[in-house]
Amino acid sequence: MIAPAVIILGAMSLWPMLQSLIWSFTKYSGLGDATWVGLNNYLDLFQDARFQQATLNTVIFAVVTMAIGPALGLGAAILLNRKMKGRAFYRAAFFIPVTTALVAVATVWKLLLNDSGVINLVLELIGLEGHQWLGDPNTALLAVCAASIWQGFGFEMVIFLAALQSVPVELLEAASLDGAGPWRRFWHVVLPSLRPTFIFVYVIGLIGGFQVFDQVYVMTQGGPVNSTLTIVYYLIDRFRGLDLGHASAVAYVLVLILVALSYLQIRLARRWA
Amino acid sequence: MRFSNQVAPVARGRRGGISVLPRKFVLHSLLIISSLLMLFPFIWALSTSLKEAKDVFDPSGGVIPNPISFDAYVNVFTKIAFSQYFLNSVIVTVLIVGLNVLFDTLAAYAFAKLKFPGRDVIFGVLLITLMIPSQVNLVPLYRFMVWLHQVFPFLGVDTLSGIVMPTMVQVFGIFLLRQFFASIPDSVVEAARLDGAGEWRILWRMIFPIAAPAIATLVIFTFLSAWNDFLWPLLISNSEASRTLPVGLTLLSRKNTVNWPETMAGSVVTIVPMIIVFLVLQRRFIEGIAAGVTK
């Protein structure tokens, strides 16, 4: 019964994993033989200004989206965590972007952010100046972040909504009787009981954030002047340049980052949750 | 069990009745405005897809196209191969979902209810792959698909099977279902065995129906990721015959001079099926997502 699953996973996941680990220590164009180069690919990467830029951009992307996305998700969850008219509609409005293809919504945002697009039009209507959001190296990455936050925070909202349902009502009532106002009840009762949820949301969000690719591919293609180049985008660049050794090394740098992050989060989870 | 949303009357009692109406008004205004902001990109995409190319950036254009033109939709389905992309996306998604339900269920049942040597070791090794981002496998998988295509021309690179193969079994699905199967008492399974039922029969006739909620979660997750997946289909397809909707869409959006009505028509065609499925299965969807990630 496990034979099909194990054979397929072996061929489609375990074997490629090992193969790219081996390739990451070789010079290999995909044709002919691979030559062993030891750690040279990794050393090259650490000295490559483009890879440094890609790593920095990816970190900025993950930090910005994770600083804002979960906050918006929690805010929406708190507003919607009650019986009221239109709740299903609001929840759907926040969640629908999550269900849609990143490529498609990135395409839509490319139109919204166009130099003569509707966002600049509205800014000019209210007396501000328009901006070349995707053409300016200082704003392109932030524009990609904005589209990603818009697309993703409904997911965090759903997780927080489920978690808020399980905050023990007895605790809230007790705090209320002790004279705690809504703000203090939130700060001292609700937030602490959401800790495991926060850790979970950040694990998933950071892992996803470090793998960002689709939005960049559609909206900016890594530009202008590498300002939106990300780790996975760099990996695909190397792959398309038939440089399988460096491409594999990039993949394993990503693995190291994600494993380190997971380890950190497990440690934090033990201490806080 | 009492839940926290019932605490609202407590809070309101302390404040008195007068402040209730304005607070409700503020709350709903806030929610309506933010909902409209959330939906605006979709509305704008739909609106642009119905405009003529020359009107797209007309500052006095507004949301309602004037005149309304369906040319963009006609073009993407006739001049550009969107009907092919759409069909490809449907085939790929149905295959990935179906194969996952089959293979993941089989493996999960074996891991949860059968005893065989090496069971926990194999499961442990599979769990490790959950930690590894899929990008690690891209390069070797691509090479594998090239090789496979040379041996079997109907498989591998630039075919729909090549898109399906890497995700036709998912450790995430096996893990999710195994957790659920493990919560079904062994005595139920053993009683059926004593009655002479084979494992195959026990799984599909007894366990599978009980596990419907978990299966639904698996189907929803797999459906979402298969329909929206981009990077792997992008790498492996290089002709119309194997492009899915997201890949076909980027051919329009990355041109130097983008035809915006056609590009937005392509986006709408990619987005709308998912929104319809979501609206129909809304509760299942949200509960499934919450259940799938907190397991």
Image (cartoon, rainbow, N blue to C red):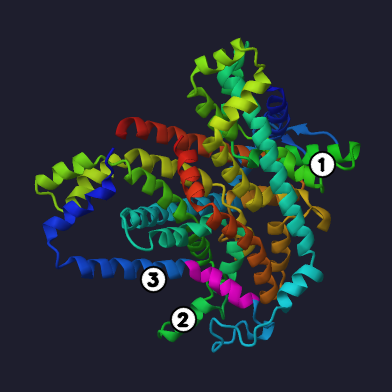
Residue B6 in view of the camera: yes
* Point 45% across, 55% down: residue: A154
Q: Position of residue A150 (x, y in %)?
A: 47, 61
Q: Position of residue B109 (x, y in %)?
A: 60, 23
Q: Disc 3 is attached to a residue of which chain?
A: B
The residue identified by callout 3 is B33
Q: Position of residue A223 (x, y in %)?
A: 61, 63
* Point 71% across, 22% down: residue: A3
Disc nearer the start of the sequence (1/3): 3
Q: Secondary structure at mark 1?
A: loop
Q: Nearer the viewer, mark 3 or mark 2?
A: 3
* Point 49% across, 45% down: residue: B289
In space, the residues marked 3 and 2 are separated at their CA atoms by 16 Å
* Point 54% across, 72% down: residue: B43
The residue identified by callout 2 is A122
The residue identified by callout 1 is B156
Q: On the image, which quarter does residue B20 sit in? A: bottom left
In space, the residues marked 1 and 3 are separated at their CA atoms by 48 Å
Question: Is residue A247 left or right of B30 when viewed as pictured?
Answer: right
Question: In the rendered image, which quarter contains the C terminus of chain A?
Answer: top left
Question: Is residue A202 left or right of B122 when viewed as pictured?
Answer: left
User: Looking at the image, do the residues carrying marks 1 and 3 touch, with CB atoms under 8 Å apart?
Assistant: no
For the record, the magenta segment spans: B39-49
Q: Disc 1 is attached to a residue of which chain?
A: B
For disc 2, the neighbor class at 10 Å (few under 14, some 14 to 19, many from 20) is some
